Image (tube, helix red, strand yellow):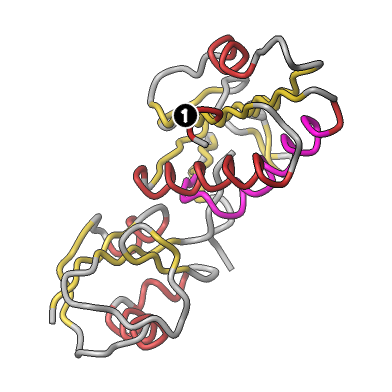
């Protein structure tokens, strides 16, 4: 199934065109793209940057599981899941998910499934940096 | 027997290490390891909760750890 999935973790800038080109196919009637972008605030507090780190070999495995499961669950043609690590500024892109399918509904559903599951299972962490300090997201009681 | 511990995210900051060797009894389960970790690294109490991965796969509480396993402390993930 790997031929229909593209999984990548990189400390370089993510490339939207790469994800699009991977999934694009003459048999498909549509491509759904989810692009995660760094937001400028958390709970009304200004964010300066996000620092992403990961357990890379396990994160790759978990991302591959999501892609493989999406291929089984939904009637889609191809899926790409790419994630960036390192320091990202406001507006920069930590994650891209691209899905192609013959009919649009499957691509929309698979795209939402992939980002929702990624946020629950893939061992990647972000630290929010503020003017006056930093916080690991989701980590405090 | 000896295993290798890996720390990530907030756990790295709290414990001050990325990786440590760790000695446990034979037939230790994940649930027992978690208790042992919390008593040896009391800083881990400051995390919401954490999961354990053994050899790059999430492990259930009743899994028995074997000699040489690579055991990762996985704080709540926040990718995307």
Q: Is residue B27 left or right of residue A100?
A: left
Q: Residue at x 20, y 89 (%)?
A: B26
Give the residue displayed 53% in from the left and 53% down from the top: B77
Image coordinates of residue A87 in percent, x first then y, are 43, 29
Query: Which sits in the foreground, A115 or B79?
Result: A115
Please state which of residues A118 and B22 is positioned toward the viewer in this rendering.
Answer: A118
Chain identity of mark 1: A
Q: Is residue A70 above or below residue A30?
A: below
User: Could you say which is closer to the camera, residue B4 or residue A46?
Assistant: B4
Snapshot quadrant of residue B35: bottom left
Mark 1, residue position: A84
**Does the magenta-highlighted stretch encompass residue B65?**
no
Q: Quadrant of the C terminus of chain A?
A: bottom right
Residue at 37% from the left image edge and 61% from the top image edge: B11
Give the tally of numbered discs: 1
Q: Place residue A114 in its image quadrant.
A: top right
**Magenta residues, start to end:** A106-125
- Asked if A59 appears above or below B51 in the picture, the reply is above
Helix, strand or loop at mark 1: strand
Can residue A25 be seen in this snapshot? yes
Q: Quadrant of residue B6?
A: bottom left
Q: Main secondary structure of the magenta part?
A: helix
Residue A61 in picture, x, y percent from top left: 43, 47
Asked if residue A48 shows in the view, the reply is no
Q: Is residue A108 magenta?
A: yes
Q: Position of residue B38 (x, y in %)?
A: 36, 81
- Residue A30 percent across, percent down from the top left: 79, 17
- Judge from the rendering whether residue A94 lies leftward or rightward of residue B40; answer left or right: right
Q: Is residue A110 left or right of residue B36?
A: right
Pointer 1: residues within 10 angstroms few (<14), some, or many (20+)?
Answer: many
- Residue A116 lies left or right of residue B75; in this view the side is right
């Amino acid at each position: 199934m790997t031929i229909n999935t593209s999984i990548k973790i990189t400390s370089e800038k993510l490339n939207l065109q790469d994800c699009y080109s991977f999934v694009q196919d003459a048999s498909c009637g549509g491509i759904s793209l989810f692009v995660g972008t760094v937001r400028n605030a958390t709970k009304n507090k200004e964010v300066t940057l996000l620092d992403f780190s990961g357990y890379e070999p396990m994160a790759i495995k978990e991302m591959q599981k999501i892609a493989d499961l999406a291929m089984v669950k939904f009637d889609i043609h191809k899926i790409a899941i790419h994630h960036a690590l390192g320091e990202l500024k406001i507006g920069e892109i930590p994650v891209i998910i691209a899905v192609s399918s013959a009919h649009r509904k499957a691509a929309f559903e698979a795209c939402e499934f992939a980002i929702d599951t990624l946020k629950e299972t893939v061992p990647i962490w972000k630290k929010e940096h503020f003017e006056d300090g930093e916080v690991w997201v989701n980590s405090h009681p | 027997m000896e295993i290798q511990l890996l720390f990530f995210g907030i756990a790295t900051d709290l414990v001050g290490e990325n990786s440590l060797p760790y000695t446990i009894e034979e037939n230790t389960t994940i649930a027992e390891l978690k208790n042992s970790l919390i008593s040896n690294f009391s800083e881990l109490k400051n995390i919401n909760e954490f999961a354990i991965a053994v050899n790059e796969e999430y492990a259930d509480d009743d899994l028995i750890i074997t000699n040489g396993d690579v055991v990762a402390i996985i704080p709540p993930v926040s990718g995307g």
